[in-house]
Image (cartoon, rainbow, N blue to C red):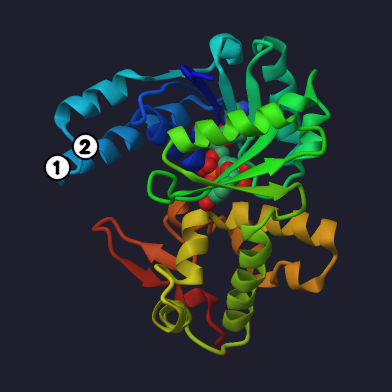
Protein backbone atom coordinates (compact mmCIF):
# COMPACT_ATOMS: atom_id res chain seq x y z
CA UNK A 1 0.00 0.00 0.00
CA UNK A 2 1.44 3.32 -1.01
CA UNK A 3 0.44 5.79 1.72
CA UNK A 4 0.10 9.14 0.01
CA UNK A 5 -2.03 10.97 2.52
CA UNK A 6 -2.15 10.81 6.32
CA UNK A 7 -4.88 12.52 8.33
CA UNK A 8 -4.11 13.22 12.01
CA UNK A 9 -6.81 14.04 14.57
CA UNK A 10 -5.37 16.24 17.34
CA UNK A 11 -2.66 18.91 16.99
CA UNK A 12 -1.15 18.39 20.45
CA UNK A 13 2.27 17.16 21.48
CA UNK A 14 1.88 13.71 19.90
CA UNK A 15 -0.18 14.69 16.85
CA UNK A 16 2.44 17.24 15.81
CA UNK A 17 5.33 14.86 16.57
CA UNK A 18 3.73 12.26 14.28
CA UNK A 19 3.06 14.95 11.65
CA UNK A 20 6.71 16.10 11.71
CA UNK A 21 7.94 12.52 11.33
CA UNK A 22 5.58 11.82 8.42
CA UNK A 23 6.24 15.00 6.42
CA UNK A 24 9.98 14.40 6.62
CA UNK A 25 9.33 10.86 5.30
CA UNK A 26 7.68 12.37 2.20
CA UNK A 27 4.06 11.82 3.24
CA UNK A 28 1.34 14.40 2.71
CA UNK A 29 -0.22 15.21 6.10
CA UNK A 30 -3.36 17.10 7.13
CA UNK A 31 -3.82 17.81 10.84
CA UNK A 32 -7.31 18.35 12.27
CA UNK A 33 -8.15 19.90 15.64
CA UNK A 34 -11.25 21.54 17.13
CA UNK A 35 -9.03 24.21 18.66
CA UNK A 36 -7.64 26.67 16.09
CA UNK A 37 -5.03 27.93 18.56
CA UNK A 38 -3.63 24.40 18.82
CA UNK A 39 -3.34 24.27 15.02
CA UNK A 40 -1.40 27.56 14.95
CA UNK A 41 0.81 26.41 17.83
CA UNK A 42 1.35 23.06 16.09
CA UNK A 43 2.50 24.71 12.85
CA UNK A 44 4.87 26.96 14.79
CA UNK A 45 6.35 24.01 16.72
CA UNK A 46 7.05 21.95 13.60
CA UNK A 47 8.58 24.93 11.77
CA UNK A 48 10.87 25.65 14.73
CA UNK A 49 11.91 22.01 15.14
CA UNK A 50 12.78 21.65 11.44
CA UNK A 51 14.62 25.01 11.42
CA UNK A 52 16.64 23.81 14.42
CA UNK A 53 17.60 20.68 12.47
CA UNK A 54 18.73 22.86 9.54
CA UNK A 55 20.74 25.17 11.85
CA UNK A 56 22.49 22.15 13.36
CA UNK A 57 23.36 20.77 9.91
CA UNK A 58 21.07 17.73 10.33
CA UNK A 59 18.79 18.73 7.45
CA UNK A 60 19.11 20.61 4.16
CA UNK A 61 17.14 23.86 3.79
CA UNK A 62 15.44 22.49 0.63
CA UNK A 63 14.38 19.31 2.44
CA UNK A 64 12.81 21.46 5.17
CA UNK A 65 10.89 23.41 2.53
CA UNK A 66 9.59 20.27 0.82
CA UNK A 67 8.63 18.76 4.19
CA UNK A 68 6.67 21.88 5.18
CA UNK A 69 4.95 21.89 1.77
CA UNK A 70 3.54 18.46 2.75
CA UNK A 71 1.81 19.88 5.84
CA UNK A 72 -1.67 21.37 6.02
CA UNK A 73 -4.22 22.05 8.75
CA UNK A 74 -8.00 21.93 8.96
CA UNK A 75 -10.96 22.30 11.29
CA UNK A 76 -13.14 20.23 8.90
CA UNK A 77 -13.11 16.53 9.76
CA UNK A 78 -14.56 15.71 6.30
CA UNK A 79 -11.13 16.61 4.84
CA UNK A 80 -10.10 13.04 5.77
CA UNK A 81 -11.98 11.70 2.73
CA UNK A 82 -8.85 11.14 0.59
CA UNK A 83 -6.59 9.83 3.40
CA UNK A 84 -5.05 6.34 3.22
CA UNK A 85 -4.24 6.31 6.94
CA UNK A 86 -5.97 8.17 9.78
CA UNK A 87 -4.34 8.52 13.21
CA UNK A 88 -6.40 9.69 16.16
CA UNK A 89 -4.11 11.52 18.64
CA UNK A 90 -6.58 13.59 20.66
CA UNK A 91 -7.04 13.91 24.42
CA UNK A 92 -6.81 10.60 26.37
CA UNK A 93 -10.52 10.26 27.09
CA UNK A 94 -12.61 7.34 25.85
CA UNK A 95 -15.78 9.35 25.16
CA UNK A 96 -13.87 12.02 23.19
CA UNK A 97 -12.06 9.35 21.19
CA UNK A 98 -15.26 7.44 20.40
CA UNK A 99 -17.04 10.56 19.17
CA UNK A 100 -14.08 11.54 16.93
CA UNK A 101 -13.71 8.03 15.54
CA UNK A 102 -17.44 7.75 14.74
CA UNK A 103 -17.32 11.11 12.98
CA UNK A 104 -14.19 10.38 10.95
CA UNK A 105 -15.62 6.99 9.92
CA UNK A 106 -18.50 8.81 8.16
CA UNK A 107 -16.11 10.46 5.69
CA UNK A 108 -13.14 8.06 5.47
CA UNK A 109 -12.80 6.02 2.29
CA UNK A 110 -13.54 2.29 2.61
CA UNK A 111 -9.91 1.30 2.09
CA UNK A 112 -8.54 3.71 4.72
CA UNK A 113 -6.97 2.30 7.87
CA UNK A 114 -8.15 3.97 11.06
CA UNK A 115 -5.82 4.00 14.04
CA UNK A 116 -5.51 5.42 17.53
CA UNK A 117 -2.38 6.56 19.36
CA UNK A 118 -4.07 5.93 22.71
CA UNK A 119 -1.74 4.95 25.56
CA UNK A 120 -4.29 2.92 27.46
CA UNK A 121 -7.80 2.74 25.98
CA UNK A 122 -8.87 -0.59 24.46
CA UNK A 123 -8.46 -0.76 20.68
CA UNK A 124 -11.22 -3.39 20.50
CA UNK A 125 -13.60 -1.02 22.31
CA UNK A 126 -12.79 1.89 19.99
CA UNK A 127 -13.04 -0.38 16.92
CA UNK A 128 -16.61 -1.30 17.93
CA UNK A 129 -17.73 2.18 16.90
CA UNK A 130 -16.75 2.06 13.22
CA UNK A 131 -18.38 0.35 10.24
CA UNK A 132 -15.54 -2.11 9.66
CA UNK A 133 -13.60 -2.93 12.87
CA UNK A 134 -11.21 -5.14 10.84
CA UNK A 135 -9.49 -1.98 9.58
CA UNK A 136 -9.00 -0.43 13.03
CA UNK A 137 -5.67 -0.81 14.90
CA UNK A 138 -3.51 0.87 17.56
CA UNK A 139 -0.42 2.85 16.55
CA UNK A 140 1.20 3.76 19.86
CA UNK A 141 4.08 6.16 19.22
CA UNK A 142 6.54 7.29 21.90
CA UNK A 143 7.53 10.84 22.73
CA UNK A 144 9.27 12.76 21.32
CA UNK A 145 8.05 10.98 18.17
CA UNK A 146 10.75 12.24 15.76
CA UNK A 147 13.47 10.86 18.08
CA UNK A 148 12.08 7.61 19.51
CA UNK A 149 12.23 4.73 17.06
CA UNK A 150 9.68 2.39 18.63
CA UNK A 151 6.10 1.91 17.46
CA UNK A 152 3.76 -0.42 19.33
CA UNK A 153 1.21 -1.83 16.92
CA UNK A 154 -1.84 -2.92 18.92
CA UNK A 155 -4.04 -5.66 17.53
CA UNK A 156 -7.69 -5.46 18.52
CA UNK A 157 -9.77 -8.64 18.59
CA UNK A 158 -11.24 -7.86 15.16
CA UNK A 159 -8.18 -6.29 13.50
CA UNK A 160 -7.43 -8.10 10.23
CA UNK A 161 -4.08 -9.57 9.24
CA UNK A 162 -4.03 -7.24 6.23
CA UNK A 163 -4.47 -4.19 8.50
CA UNK A 164 -1.57 -5.35 10.70
CA UNK A 165 0.70 -5.88 7.71
CA UNK A 166 -0.15 -2.50 6.17
CA UNK A 167 0.35 -0.74 9.53
CA UNK A 168 3.76 -2.32 10.06
CA UNK A 169 4.80 -1.34 6.52
CA UNK A 170 3.61 2.24 7.18
CA UNK A 171 5.39 2.35 10.57
CA UNK A 172 8.61 1.22 8.87
CA UNK A 173 8.20 3.92 6.21
CA UNK A 174 8.10 6.40 9.12
CA UNK A 175 11.45 4.98 10.27
CA UNK A 176 10.05 3.06 13.23
CA UNK A 177 10.77 -0.43 14.53
CA UNK A 178 7.43 -2.11 15.20
CA UNK A 179 6.50 -4.48 17.98
CA UNK A 180 3.03 -6.03 18.09
CA UNK A 181 1.03 -6.03 21.31
CA UNK A 182 -2.19 -7.75 22.26
CA UNK A 183 -4.98 -5.34 23.24
CA UNK A 184 -4.38 -5.46 27.00
CA UNK A 185 -4.25 -2.38 29.30
CA UNK A 186 -0.94 -0.52 28.89
CA UNK A 187 0.08 -2.75 25.97
CA UNK A 188 3.74 -3.85 26.42
CA UNK A 189 5.76 -0.77 27.39
CA UNK A 190 3.35 1.24 29.59
CA UNK A 191 2.39 -1.91 31.48
CA UNK A 192 5.97 -1.96 32.79
CA UNK A 193 6.69 1.78 32.81
CA UNK A 194 3.63 3.03 34.73
CA UNK A 195 4.30 1.26 38.07
CA UNK A 196 7.90 2.53 37.97
CA UNK A 197 6.77 6.13 37.41
CA UNK A 198 4.13 5.79 40.14
CA UNK A 199 6.77 4.63 42.60
CA UNK A 200 8.79 7.78 41.83
CA UNK A 201 5.73 9.88 42.88
CA UNK A 202 5.44 7.85 46.10
CA UNK A 203 9.13 8.51 46.87
CA UNK A 204 8.40 12.25 46.65
CA UNK A 205 5.27 11.91 48.83
CA UNK A 206 7.26 10.08 51.50
CA UNK A 207 10.27 12.40 51.30
CA UNK A 208 12.61 9.51 50.49
CA UNK A 209 14.57 11.56 47.96
CA UNK A 210 14.41 14.97 46.32
CA UNK A 211 13.15 15.52 42.76
CA UNK A 212 16.71 15.83 41.46
CA UNK A 213 17.98 12.81 43.42
CA UNK A 214 15.22 10.56 42.08
CA UNK A 215 15.92 11.62 38.49
CA UNK A 216 19.69 11.43 38.90
CA UNK A 217 19.33 8.00 40.51
CA UNK A 218 17.65 6.55 37.43
CA UNK A 219 19.82 8.45 34.93
CA UNK A 220 23.14 7.43 36.48
CA UNK A 221 22.18 4.18 38.16
CA UNK A 222 20.22 2.62 35.30
CA UNK A 223 21.52 4.66 32.39
CA UNK A 224 18.04 6.01 31.55
CA UNK A 225 18.31 9.02 29.19
CA UNK A 226 16.01 11.02 31.47
CA UNK A 227 14.73 10.61 35.03
CA UNK A 228 11.13 9.45 35.72
CA UNK A 229 9.98 12.89 36.89
CA UNK A 230 11.53 14.63 33.87
CA UNK A 231 9.80 12.02 31.68
CA UNK A 232 6.37 12.56 33.27
CA UNK A 233 6.75 16.33 32.86
CA UNK A 234 7.36 15.72 29.15
CA UNK A 235 4.44 13.25 28.80
CA UNK A 236 2.05 15.58 30.70
CA UNK A 237 0.65 15.02 34.22
CA UNK A 238 -2.93 14.97 32.83
CA UNK A 239 -2.09 12.30 30.25
CA UNK A 240 -0.21 10.24 32.86
CA UNK A 241 -3.16 10.41 35.28
CA UNK A 242 -5.69 9.48 32.58
CA UNK A 243 -3.59 6.47 31.56
CA UNK A 244 -3.18 5.33 35.17
CA UNK A 245 -6.93 5.61 35.82
CA UNK A 246 -7.61 3.25 32.89
CA UNK A 247 -4.91 0.77 33.90
CA UNK A 248 -6.03 0.72 37.55
CA UNK A 249 -9.69 0.37 36.60
CA UNK A 250 -9.02 -2.45 34.11
CA UNK A 251 -6.27 -4.40 35.91
CA UNK A 252 -7.28 -3.66 39.51
CA UNK A 253 -3.78 -4.17 40.90
CA UNK A 254 -2.87 -1.41 43.45
CA UNK A 255 0.50 -0.92 41.74
CA UNK A 256 -1.42 0.97 39.02
CA UNK A 257 -3.36 3.20 41.48
CA UNK A 258 -2.31 6.81 40.83
CA UNK A 259 -0.42 8.43 43.72
CA UNK A 260 -2.44 11.17 45.42
CA UNK A 261 0.29 13.68 44.49
CA UNK A 262 -0.44 13.09 40.79
CA UNK A 263 -4.15 13.89 41.28
CA UNK A 264 -3.31 17.06 43.21
CA UNK A 265 -0.89 18.24 40.52
CA UNK A 266 -3.50 17.65 37.80
CA UNK A 267 -6.11 19.55 39.86
CA UNK A 268 -3.69 22.45 40.30
CA UNK A 269 -3.02 22.57 36.54
CA UNK A 270 0.66 21.76 37.10
CA UNK A 271 0.78 19.56 34.01
CA UNK A 272 4.50 19.58 33.26
CA UNK A 273 6.36 21.20 30.39
CA UNK A 274 3.18 22.19 28.54
CA UNK A 275 2.09 24.53 31.36
CA UNK A 276 5.61 25.52 32.46
CA UNK A 277 5.26 23.79 35.84
CA UNK A 278 5.18 20.16 36.96
CA UNK A 279 7.87 18.37 38.95
CA UNK A 280 10.11 21.13 37.61
CA UNK A 281 9.53 24.80 36.85
CA UNK A 282 10.49 25.65 33.26
CA UNK A 283 12.09 29.06 32.75
CA UNK A 284 12.08 31.23 29.63
CA UNK A 285 15.85 30.87 29.18
CA UNK A 286 15.38 27.08 28.71
CA UNK A 287 16.60 26.08 32.20
CA UNK A 288 14.54 24.23 34.80
CA UNK A 289 14.55 24.10 38.60
CA UNK A 290 12.78 21.59 40.91
CA UNK A 291 9.25 22.49 42.04
CA UNK A 292 9.98 22.53 45.79
CA UNK A 293 6.26 23.12 46.63
CA UNK A 294 5.86 19.36 46.15
CA UNK A 295 8.35 18.37 48.82
CA UNK A 296 7.38 17.37 52.34
CA UNK A 297 7.65 20.26 54.79
CA UNK A 298 5.97 21.37 58.02
N1 LIG B 1 2.20 12.60 25.80
C1 LIG B 1 2.83 11.45 25.53
O1 LIG B 1 4.02 11.29 25.83
C2 LIG B 1 2.09 10.35 24.81
C3 LIG B 1 2.81 9.20 24.38
C4 LIG B 1 2.12 8.21 23.66
C5 LIG B 1 0.77 8.34 23.39
N2 LIG B 1 0.11 9.47 23.84
C6 LIG B 1 -1.32 9.58 23.51
O2 LIG B 1 -1.50 10.52 22.48
C7 LIG B 1 -2.76 11.18 22.62
C8 LIG B 1 -2.56 12.68 22.64
O3 LIG B 1 -1.68 13.04 23.69
P1 LIG B 1 -0.92 14.45 23.69
O4 LIG B 1 0.16 14.33 24.71
O5 LIG B 1 -0.60 14.85 22.30
O6 LIG B 1 -2.08 15.40 24.27
P2 LIG B 1 -2.21 16.99 24.12
O7 LIG B 1 -2.99 17.42 25.31
O8 LIG B 1 -0.89 17.62 23.85
O9 LIG B 1 -3.09 17.17 22.78
C9 LIG B 1 -4.41 16.73 22.65
C10 LIG B 1 -5.03 17.46 21.46
O10 LIG B 1 -6.32 16.89 21.21
C11 LIG B 1 -7.16 17.95 20.78
N3 LIG B 1 -8.55 17.57 20.89
C12 LIG B 1 -9.33 17.47 22.00
N4 LIG B 1 -10.59 17.11 21.64
C13 LIG B 1 -10.59 16.98 20.29
C14 LIG B 1 -11.58 16.64 19.33
N5 LIG B 1 -12.83 16.36 19.71
N6 LIG B 1 -11.23 16.62 18.03
C15 LIG B 1 -9.95 16.90 17.65
N7 LIG B 1 -8.97 17.23 18.51
C16 LIG B 1 -9.30 17.28 19.81
C17 LIG B 1 -6.77 19.10 21.71
O11 LIG B 1 -7.22 20.36 21.18
C18 LIG B 1 -5.25 18.95 21.70
O12 LIG B 1 -4.68 19.68 20.63
C19 LIG B 1 -3.39 10.62 23.90
O13 LIG B 1 -4.25 9.58 23.54
C20 LIG B 1 -2.19 10.09 24.67
O14 LIG B 1 -2.49 9.06 25.56
C21 LIG B 1 0.73 10.47 24.53
Q: Is mark 2 within 8 Å of ligand 1?
A: no
Quarter of the image where one finds residue 157? top right
Task: Label 1: state its secondary structure.
Answer: helix
Q: Is residue 258 left or right of residue 90?
A: right
- Please tell me which residue is depicted at 83% across the width and 29% down the height of the picture: 128
Toward which corner of the image does residue 203 lie, by quadrant? bottom right
- Alpha-carbon span between mark 1 and mark 2: 6 Å
Q: Is residue 227 above or below residue 209?
A: above
The quadrant the N terminus occupies is top right
Q: Which mark is residue 55?
A: 1
Residue 88 visible at all: no
Q: Are marks 1 and 2 in contact (CB under 8 Å)?
A: yes
Q: Residue at horizontal 61%, vertical 73%? A: 196
Question: Which residue is depicted at the point 23% across and 58% down?
Answer: 285
Q: Quadrant of the C terminus?
A: bottom right
In the rendered image of this protein, does residue 41 appear above or below residue 287? above
Classify residue 173 by image quadrant.
top left
- Ligand 1 lies in quarter: top right
Does the Cβ of the disc 1 residue fall within 8 Å of ligand 1?
A: no
Q: Secondary structure at mark 2?
A: helix
Please tell me whether residue 229 is drawn above or below residue 106 in the rendered image. Answer: below
Residue 260 % position (x, y): 70, 71
Front one among 54 and 290:
54
58 lies left or right of 73 = left
Q: Where in the figure is residue 291, as x and y percent of width and height?
A: 45, 72
User: Percent position (x, y) of residue 154?
Assistant: 68, 43
Residue that badge 2 annotates: 51
Amino acid sequence: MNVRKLFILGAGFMGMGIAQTAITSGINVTVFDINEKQLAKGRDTVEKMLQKNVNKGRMEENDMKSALANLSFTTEISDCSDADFIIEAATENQDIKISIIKEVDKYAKDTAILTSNTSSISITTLAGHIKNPARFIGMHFFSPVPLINLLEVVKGLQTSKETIEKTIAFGEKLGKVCIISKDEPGFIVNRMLIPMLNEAFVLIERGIGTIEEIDEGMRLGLNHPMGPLELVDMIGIDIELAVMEVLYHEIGDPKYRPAVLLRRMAAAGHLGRKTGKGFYIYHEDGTKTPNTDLLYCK
